[in-house]
Image (tube, helix red, strand yellow):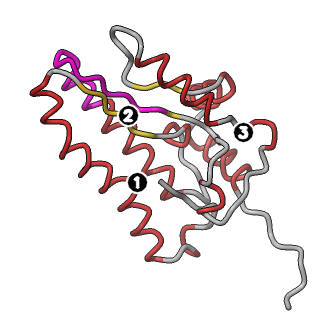
Amino acid sequence: GFGQAISFIDEDPQSVIDEVTVNIATLVELTHSFLPAMVDRKDGVVINIASTAAFQSLPYMAVYGATKAFVLSFTEALWGETRESGVKVLAVCPGPTETEFFEAGGSSPALGRFIRKREHVMETTFKELAKPKPRAAVIDGGLNKLTAISSRFFTRTFAIKLSGKIMKPKKSTSAPK
């Protein structure tokens, strides 16, 4: 998947379509292609990558956050449908992770030491899948869990305003060339 830290009205329309296509349409198409055979075999694993962005509205990453909310909801629903089938279905919800995500979206997080390593996310994923009855979703990292559940303690309006302050892209301070 990919996402950009940019105001929705400034986002390139084709980029928005591409983001929805990759983060939602392709994920649904691939899941629909492979899941029936897994259910028939009574064996298989579906791992969909959601995000901690799935748990709150994200100004300046509106499309990304909405697509990841879809991934979480879709995967949880499939988990509910397939629980007794022998197939494991899991939504993985990492926060900022050391991947090419930020370069692909043309942004860089100001989160420094809070970025998780890929190995941590994979360890969390496989630890959950090793359980006889894994949950529908898993959040990687203690700080990410806190961030994801914090929206339960605030009004949605407050959470959106706070997220907007955190996510607002920094204005360039360099002089035009």
Q: Residue at x 18, y 15 (%)?
A: 84
- Provide the secondary structure element on which disc 1 rests: helix
Position of the C terminus by quadrant = bottom right
Q: Is residue 171 magenta?
A: no
Amino acid of disc 1: Asn
- Span of residues in magenta: 77-92
- Provide the secondary structure element on which disc 2 rests: strand
According to the picture, the residue beneath numbered tag 1 turns out to be 23
Expressed as whole percent of the image width and height from the top left, the position of residue 7 reads 61, 67
Query: Horizontally, is 141 left or right of 132 in the view?
Result: right
According to the picture, the residue beneath numbered tag 3 turns out to be 115
Query: Horizontally, is 133 left or right of 31 in the view?
Result: right
Find out whether the residues at labels 3 and 1 contact each other: C-beta distance under 8 Å. Answer: no
Amino acid of disc 2: Ile
Dot 1 or dot 2: first in sequence order is 1
Q: Quadrant of residue 168?
A: bottom right
Q: Residue at x 60, y 25 (%)?
A: 145
Within-10-Å neighbours for mark 2: few <14, some 14–19, many 20+: some
Amino acid of disc 3: Ile
Q: Nearer the viewer, mark 1 or mark 2?
A: 2
Dot 3 or dot 2: first in sequence order is 2
Cα distance in 3D space between marks 3 and 2: 21 Å
Q: Quadrant of residue 136?
A: top left
According to the picture, the residue beneath numbered tag 2 turns out to be 47
Query: Horizontally, is 157 left or right of 132 in the view?
Result: right
Find out whether the residues at labels 3 and 2 contact each other: C-beta distance under 8 Å. Answer: no
- Provide the secondary structure element on which disc 3 rests: loop
Q: Nearer the viewer, residue 10 or 16?
A: 16
Q: Which mark is residue 163?
A: none
> Image height check: is 111 above or below 154?
below
